[in-house]
Structure formats: structure tokens, C-alpha cells
Image (spheres, helix red, strand yellow):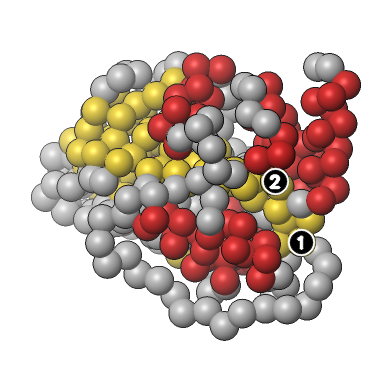
Amino acid sequence: MDRSILGALFLFCLLGSCATGNRSEKVVQIQPAMTPAGKLFIIGGGKRPPAMLEELIRVSGIGEGGHAIVLTMASEEPDTAAYYGIRQFLEMGLPAGRLRALHFEKGNYPPDAVDSVRSARLVYITGGDQNRFMDVVLDSPVYEAIHEAYQQGATIAGTSAGAAVMSAKMITGNEFKHPDYTGDFRTIEAENIEVKEGLGLLQGAIVDQHFIYRMRMNRLITVALDQPSETCIGIDESTAILVEGRQARVVGDYQVIVLHNPDQSRKSQNGLLGGRSLKLDVLLPGDVFGLD
């Protein structure tokens, strides 16, 4: 990487922090009332190949003008998340002057920074811990600003934890019956997988990420049985779905798993979950599927 890119990264990581200032705004939680004009670009984590980033830049229109915001609240190392979040767009040729990283803290939402989110053409949410992100954003001016940007035509993108937060019902990553996290989901049990409130940009669907690479099918089956009205979507690493209205297209290198429970079948026996006639699709890059 040349020195101009490194210098720009350093500058924008410094300027993007919202850890100072005490002004805040009263928030009214937004519930989507109409089809948003914007798009969702939901990435399953892992490496982001150039072709995927090119598609994100194309569909968002950020290459033509406007500014992009990188939100780092999911990360416990926000400076590092800002560095890499900005760098990926610089390496794709976007001007440094139209990229800004922001890290809000709970209860501290400077109005000028919130306005930058609201007016962004692209909002990109980094990986980390989806619970950390929602703890800062839920019932805040940032929540409202993200929704307003999406309604007005912005593309909201996120990877890993930034993908999980897109749903109205968010997989937290926690298990009630197996609280010591190992990354393995070895059972299909009732009252085990924790689901909390997410951003609610993606209605009627629940997203899981790092899906095939980390073998998370048991978790998604559990969610499909526990949340039978939701479309359950497992997105692999280096793969994304582009959501426009109620239609989604697979983008990237690998597969997306879509699991439906059309009969809303659910049976619990001795703590185990069962169900019949679940529908599973294994979708390849370029495949399109509906969200209704």
C-alpha cells in the first residue's frame, strides 16, 4: 500500500471517533411503514473479494458521489476496525475525502455525526459482537438515522456481526443451555438459541453468518423451528446477499442456505426440537430468492 493511502487511513481513523461530546437527541423508534428505497448488502464474514466490493460500490452508487460511513461499534478494537473498513474502499479507488469512520458510545450521539449517518449514501457496519453494537444503537438517534438513510435510498452493508444485526430478530450467538461459547452448535434443542432485537432493516427473515465454513446448520434449524414465521438465511464467508425490496440475490464466492418452515411445524420432546416438512435451498452466486 502506498504512503498516501496509509496517511489517509490514519487521518480518518482519528477524525471519525465520536467518543467526546455529551449532546444527545430524543429518539422515537422507527417501524418501517413502506418499502425502503435503499438496499441491504449483507456479508457472511471472512475475506471480502474485490468483485464483491465492486458490486457493493456499484449498487450503492458511492462511486458516483456522496459519502460512506463505517460504523465500528461492534468491535472491541474500533480503531483497527476503522482502519480496515476504510482501507478496503480506498483500495477500490474511492476518494479518502468521502469516507469516514464513526464510533458512537452508549448515551453519546453527537448530532453532526448522527447527521452524517442519516445523509450517507453507504453505511457499512463492521464485524465484532452484534450484542455490543445493538447495546449502543438500540433506542438511539443512530438507530433512527440508519433507518432514515435506508428509507431514503442508502445502501446499508454489514459483515459478520454487521450482518446479524440486519434482522428484526437477531441471533446473538449465545446459547442458554451451553453458555460457554465454543463455536460448535452440536444440538437442536428447545429454549437454547438466544434471539434478541436487531436493527429491523430486514423484516421477516433471520440471518446467520460464517455459515457453511463454521458448520452452523444446527443453529439455523433450531431457529427455524423456534421462529417458524421467519425465513432463515445462512450466508457463508466471502459471500453476501443483496436485498432490494422483498427479493435477494447471492453475491460473492460461495453459497447461501435458505431454510423455511412453511407448515410452522414444531415439536418439543424432553428438551429436543423436532419438525416436519422444512424446506431447504442451497443457492449459488447469482441465484435470486424471495423473502415472502
| Residue at x-position 22% and y-position 56% | 229
Mark 1 vs 2, N-terminal side: 1
Examine the image and state in which quarter residue 228 appears: bottom left
- Check whether the beta carbons of the residues at disc 1 and disc 2 lie within 8 A of each other: no
Quadrant location, the N terminus:
top right
Query: In percent of the image, x 25 and y 62: which residue is there?
Result: 34
Q: Residues within 10 Å of mark 2 (few under 14, many from 20)?
A: many
Measured as percent of width and height from the top left, residue 47 is found at: 60, 23
Judging by the rendered image, the residue that carries numbered circle 1 is: 18
Q: Residue furthest front?
A: 65
Q: Is residue 82 left or right of residue 142?
A: right
Report crowding for label 1: few under 14, some 14 to 19, many 20 or more residues within 10 A (C-alpha): some
State the mark number for residue 142. Answer: none
Q: Residue 80: horizontal and vertical position, in percent?
A: 79, 39
Task: Give the vertical position of 48 relative to 16 (above or below).
Answer: above
Residue positioned 69% across, 27% down in the render: 90
Number of the front mark, 1 or 2: 2
Q: Quadrant of residue 40?
A: top left
Q: Residue at x 59, y 43 (%)?
A: 68
Badge 2 marks a residue whose secondary structure is strand
Q: Position of residue 289 (x, y in %)?
A: 22, 33
Viewer-closest of 192 and 93: 93
Residue 19 against residue 221 in the figure, above or below: below
Amino acid type indicated by mark 1: Cys
- Answer left or right for 149 relative to 202: right
Task: Give the amino acid type for the residue marked by disc 2 in the picture.
Answer: Arg
Given residues 73 and 218, the one toward you in this image is 73
Q: Disc 1 versus disc 2: distance between alpha carbons?
A: 11 Å
183 sits left or right of 148 in the view: right
Residue 100: which numbered mark, if any?
A: 2
The location of residue 86, given as percent across then percent down, is 70, 35
Position above or below: 152 against 61: below
